Image: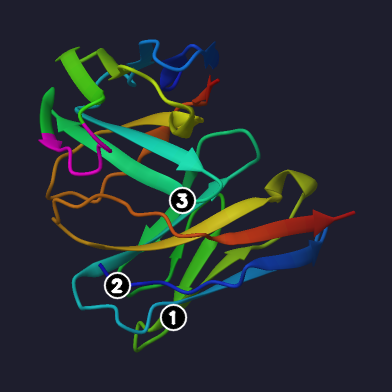
Amino acid sequence: DAKTTQPTSMDCAEGRAANLPCNHSTISGNEYVYWYRQIHSQGPQYIIHGLKNNETNEMASLIITEDRKSSTLILPHATLRDTAVYYCIVRVAGSARQLTFGSGTQLTVLP
Amino acid sequence: DAGVIQSPRHEVTEMGQEVTLRCKPISGHNSLFWYRQTMMRGLELLIYFNNNVPIDDSGMPEDRFSAKMPNASFSTLKIQPSEPRDSAVYFCASSFGGLATNEKLFFGSGTQLSVL
């Protein structure tokens, strides 16, 4: 699976959009981009995933560049409860290898 | 739905003792995963079951670790004998699907294990 690079930490003001970048320059054509987050003392939580088209759900939007070498997770109106570690993961569709979590981005939403 | 249920929530034991962690996946899910999380190594996949059958146990640290899934609604992770370096948070996750899908994983709240 392709390796991902994320900033170690980011801050965001409450009520503003949080834009979390992820670089996956070695991604291959059949690899999906997944985002999970982990709030302190809880298990990871699925957010969203996509292949090449932009995706949106009730939690967030995922923007994947045309060359698929990077993506951005957007939390449109961040709240204090969005403070968490956000993991960007790339996984080959149909692979027997399961999700591998890197070190992620610590997002802190400030009041 | 109650989600993935893990027990105990916290476990403190002495080196050399046997430890058993338990997991009840979400009803209807046919894939189950055990992960371990430490500050040093982050989240590591230990073992993956599909339809109660172990598919990939390459992440199991050594023979002291064993996992079973006797039925679709229950799994255990056993450490015997336990060592201080096994101290970590152990997560169980489940999903609906198999190897060819892009299933979402649902995680439990974890078991905080401390081996003294």
Q: Quadrant of the image for the C terminus of chain A? A: bottom right
Which region of the structure is painted magenta? B55-62
Mark nearer the viewer, 2 or 3? 3
Q: Classify 10 Å Cα crowding around label 2: few (below 14), some (14-19), many (20 and above).
A: some
**Spatial separation of the CA atoms under disc 3 and disc 1:** 25 Å
Q: Which residue is mark 2?
A: A2
* Residue at 37% in and 87% down: A66
* Residue A4, x across and y down, in percent: 41, 72
* Residue at 25% in and 37% down: B60
Q: Classify 10 Å Cα crowding around label 1: few (below 14), some (14-19), many (20 and above).
A: some
* Whether residue B92 is situated above or below residue A23 in the rendered picture: above
Q: Which residue is mark 1?
A: A70
* Whether residue A23 is situated above or below residue A43 in the rendered picture: below
In the rendered image, the residue lying farthest to the right is A111
What residue type is disc 2 on?
Ala
Name the magenta segment's main secondary structure: loop
Helix, strand or loop under label 3: loop
Q: Classify 10 Å Cα crowding around label 3: few (below 14), some (14-19), many (20 and above).
A: few
* Residue at 41% in and 22% down: B4
